[in-house]
Amino acid sequence: MKIYKLFLMVFLIACIFGLSNANAAGLGFYGTGGLGTADWTVDSGYYSIPNFKKDTNHLGLGLALDTAPARDNLFNYHLNIGYDRFTHKGGGAWGTADFEGILLSNNFGFGALINPTTRLWFGPEVRLEWAEGSPKQYPDYKIHLFGIGIGPVLGLNFNLGENHTIVVKAGFQYLHYYGEGSGSFAHTTNSQSTYSNSYDYDVTEKLYYVSLEFLFRTSGDR
């Protein structure tokens, strides 16, 4: 899939930038989960469709980069890029829908060491996401979304020995998705029939999340 290759390229460029410029960074893996709510606005182009609200949950994993996980720096850049799977469930015409895609999270942290093995940082996070999915009851109807979000993030780094760091990160995201859906709907009354249509979607999501990361530090980050 082209979008996965694009994000892998972005991550590799960011890693090279971080490692070559600072010669002190941490590179590893993350897992994340979150809960929130989403307000959906639908534009059919022909007639009015009521707006609806859905509960959301997110699960994801991927690669992580931090430019100063252990050093007593004022600033650190923290990057997450990976797979995100989320579900929107609740009201609306098509009920529950599952989505999956790629997440790019840029964190701009400011902080300092609390003690020789612990670093606390906080700052703004800018998030980009590309995702696609279908309602569970209409698998032939595809929804494609692009989202951009911003919000605060708080990170706590626990440095283990000379080479490893565990990061606990928590944040809030105010996300805005733009997208479209197209494909066929199936309805069963006395007989089964299908019809096709396309809709534009405008989605606002409020998301709370927690991430856990494990980083391998370079020799310059002590």
Image: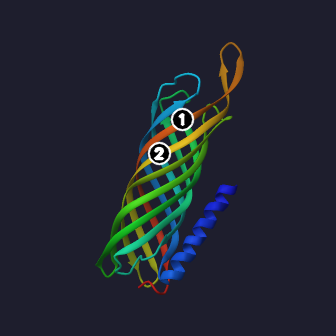
Give residue 82's position: percent from left, percent from top.
56, 60
Which residue appears at 61% of the width and 45% of the height?
132
Q: Could you tell which of marks 1 and 2 lies nearer the N-terminus?
A: 1
**Disc 1 to disc 2, C-alpha distance:** 19 Å
Q: Residue at x 68, y 12 (%)?
A: 190
Q: Amino acid at mark 2?
A: His
* Quarter occupied by the N terminus: bottom right
In this rendering, the count of numbered labels is: 2
Image check: 145 left or right of 156? right
Residue 202 location, x and y as percent?
A: 50, 38
Image vertical order of residue 54 relative to residue 162, above or below: above
150 or 92: nearer the viewer: 150
User: Tag 2, which secondary structure?
Assistant: strand
Which numbered disc, 1 or 2, marks the residue closer to the eye? Answer: 2
Residue at which label 2 appears: 176
- Residue farthest toward the top in the current orientation of the protein: 190
Furthest toward the left, the residue is 114
* Residue 149 in view, yes or no: yes
Q: Is residue 154 visible?
A: no
Q: Position of residue 102 (x, y in %)?
A: 58, 55
Residue type at mark 1 is Thr
Residue holding disc 1? 96
Is 115 displayed left or right of 155 in the figure?
A: left
Quarter holding the C terminus?
Answer: bottom left
